[in-house]
Image: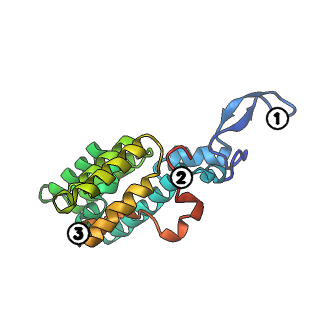
Amino acid sequence: LKSRSPSCGIKDVNIYTGYEKSPTKGKGPGIFGGAVLRKLSHIAVEEEGRLSNFTIREHFFTKLFTITHFRRIKQNGNLEELIAFQSVYKYLFMAYNQSKQKELGRIIANHKKDKVESIFKKYEEMLYELLKRTPRYTSHVNVCQHIFGYFKKNLKNQEKEHFLTLLQKYKEKKIPLSSLLSVLKSWALRFEEQYLLRQTYFEPYPETLVEISDSGKGRDY
C-alpha cells in the first residue's frame, strides 16, 4: 500500500482534528489502510516505502509466499499435503517461533482425533500467529546450529571452526545470514541431505525477487 497516503497508508498518516486547515492530532493508518488492518491483519500487508528496508521486505515476501502455498493446500483439503508442507517449512517456522512451530506439529499429529476442516482451521490460525513478526537473530542462530548438526560428524575440524567463526561474526552483525546459509546449503549438497535441500528456509520466496544489493545486508537494513 502507498506510504503515508490518507487512504492507503497503514501508519504515519497525519490525522487532523477537522476538515479545513485543522491541526494534526497525531499519526495513524489511512481510511482504507486502517480497514485492511482491522479486517485482514493476518495477511501480508506493507507500505511500499518500507519495502526498501531489507528485513521488512524479506519478511513481507516470506509471509506472502508461505500463506499462498498454504492456501493452495487448504483449497485441496489434502492432509498428506499439509503434512508435507509442515515438513519442508520446519526450519523456517522454527526461525519465526519455535514454540508455535511445535504447536503446528501437534495439530497435525492429532489428525486422527479431529475432522480435516477443523485441523486446517486450527493450523491456519496458528500459522498466522507464527508469521506475525520477523524472526529474531538468536532464532536464526538456533536454526543454523540445528542444521549444522547434520554435518558435524562428516566435517573436518577446520571446516567446523570456520563455520563457528562465521556464526560468531553473524552474532556480532559483521556478516549477513546469507553467508551462513550459503555454507550450510553447500554442505547439504555435498552430503546429499535431501531433507535439508527441500527446506524453504534456504529460499522462502523466489530468487528472482532477491536484489543484488541484498546479498551483503544484515539485520539492520
The amino acid type of the residue labelled 2 equals Lys
Q: Quadrant of residue 89?
A: bottom left
Split into 4 quadrants, where in the image is the N terminus?
Answer: bottom right
The residue positioned farthest toward the front in the image shown: 158
Q: Which residue is at 67% across, 38% downward?
A: 12
Q: Which residue is mark 3?
A: 193
Q: Which residue is at 28% across, 45% downward?
A: 98
Give the CA separation, mark 3 to mark 2. Answer: 27 Å
Task: Name the secondary structure under disc 1.
Answer: loop
Q: Does 78 appear above or below 145?
A: below
Task: Name the secondary structure under disc 2.
Answer: loop
Q: Which residue is mark 1?
A: 19
User: Residue 132: which disc?
Assistant: none
* Viewer-proximal residue among 98 and 40: 98
**Residue 164, how many percent across, how many down?**
31, 48
**Residue 221, how many percent across, how many down?**
56, 47
**Residue depth check, mark 3 versus mark 1: number of the one nearer the observer:** 3
Give the CA separation, mark 3 to mark 1. Answer: 63 Å
| Mark 1, other Cα within 10 Å: few <14 / some 14–19 / many ≥20 | few
Q: Which residue is mark 2?
A: 217
Whichever of labels 3 and 1 marks the residue nearer the N terminus, that label is 1
Q: Does 93 appear above or below 14?
A: below
Q: Quadrant of residue 19?
A: top right
Left or right: where does residue 40 sit relative to residue 26? Answer: left
Observer able to see residue 121 = no
Task: Name the secondary structure under disc 3.
Answer: loop
**Residue 147, how many percent across, how many down?**
26, 56
The amino acid type of the residue labelled 3 equals Glu
Q: Quadrant of residue 20?
A: top right
